[in-house]
Amino acid sequence: MEGTEKQDLIFLELRQRLQSGLLIIRSDAFEDKAEVNVTSRDSAIEIHVPDGGYLVKLKPGVSLVEGSWHKSQQLNADGLHVRLHLRVDQPSEALDSATVCLKALEKYHFLCQSCGAILVKEKVFRRVLPLPNGNWNALVDDWCCHPDPFANKKLLPQEEDCLVGDTYFLLTRDSSCDNSLTQQIDSSCVNLDTSQYSVKTAGCKNVVVFCKMCSAVLGEAVTSEVLKFYITEVVIKQSEEREFTVPQHRQQFLERALTSRLLELSSAQSIFRFSIQTPDCKSVIMLWLLNTDTLIASFSEKVTSSNGLISSDRHLDEHQSCQAASAVKVLYLACNRAEHQEAVDAWEKDISVHPLALPWSTCDELLQLLSSCTSTLPPSLSSMNSYQVAYLKR
């Protein structure tokens, strides 16, 4: 899957722990690098080029050390590189995900992320329990001195339980589900896009659960009484919240829901490499967390008079403004590419690689999201060895 987007005109990457940054300005933004200037003001970075100015607002406690920026001696193939030095009071922390926020004896609504319909109403859990590590079955032989007592057994919730997996919730059905959910046996087991991935094994019979309102895939029916909802497909709200907001933009929700979960697993278990898989354990993406303290900002094209802002100290300059976003820098491989097969095989045999299951359609969405990000990066930042580079916003 190749991206067709154009490289961003201006791309800024800041590392909070290293207190450093890299600014890359596309070569068509200036004729002479002497025309490029970088200044600091009020927790922001101003980038001045001949056609106008660009303002990047920074997080509280992060600022540019005045006069610390240095231009590269020669222009690179992707433009002018400018090194920056930062002053950082405290690196920003990741927000908790829905799996962390769920608590026992609280009342929750489960909503469809796509359309906002209430799927499960006023659900109260007596217990909220974490499930074992995603590949715990593979480790049983190492810590069990007798035959695997869990072989061919599923860990299922009791009536008032919620079991929390790496990327999903297990809960029991109630009467509200009859009006909000539909399900269908997926006996064909064929992927949505067979040009990208191989056909699934014939004969498997996953029972897929859909939203009755919009037909979005939500998860699976593990048994007739137990549902599996993926964290990328549902929104959880406390019942005390009187009004529910319109569903967040799909790409933004997917990006932030998955990123927060990756950060939690990385922090709690020192896991940095993940295999993004379909429910039938077909690997789609190999993902490697590289940096978790990154701030990024970018401008796709030149400033135009219609959306320019006026600088308070240089009234003739037009400014485009944006907020630097917290992001996780990742390396990834698409498993459908033949040239990656050797690396994919090595990852699949490595027990330190953590499997994460997502619906088929969500795996495809995630791959498109990563590829789209990679295609707009400066070429010098878009790959590392055989891996592609992307940034997932937190």
Image (cartoon, rainbow, N blue to C red):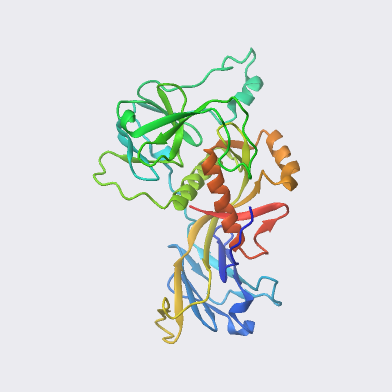
Front-most of residues 132 and 251: 251
* Image-quadrant location for residue 115: top left
**For residue 16, side relative to residue 80 (left or right):** left
The residue lying furthest to the front in this view is 188
- The residue shown at (55%, 33%) is 279
- Determine if residue 105 is in view: no
Residue 133: % across, % down: 55, 30
Residue 232: % across, % down: 46, 42
- How many numbered callouts? 0
Relative to 282, say whether 152 is above or below.
Answer: above
- The residue shown at (65%, 36%) is 352
The residue lying furthest to the bottom in this view is 316
* Image-quadrant location for residue 209: top left
**For residue 128, side relative to residue 27 (left or right):** left
- The residue shown at (23%, 44%) is 242
Relative to 151, say whether 52 is above or below.
Answer: below
- The residue shown at (42%, 39%) is 100
Residue 158: % across, % down: 39, 20
- Determine if residue 307 is in view: yes
Residue 271: % across, % down: 59, 40
The residue lying furthest to the top in this view is 146
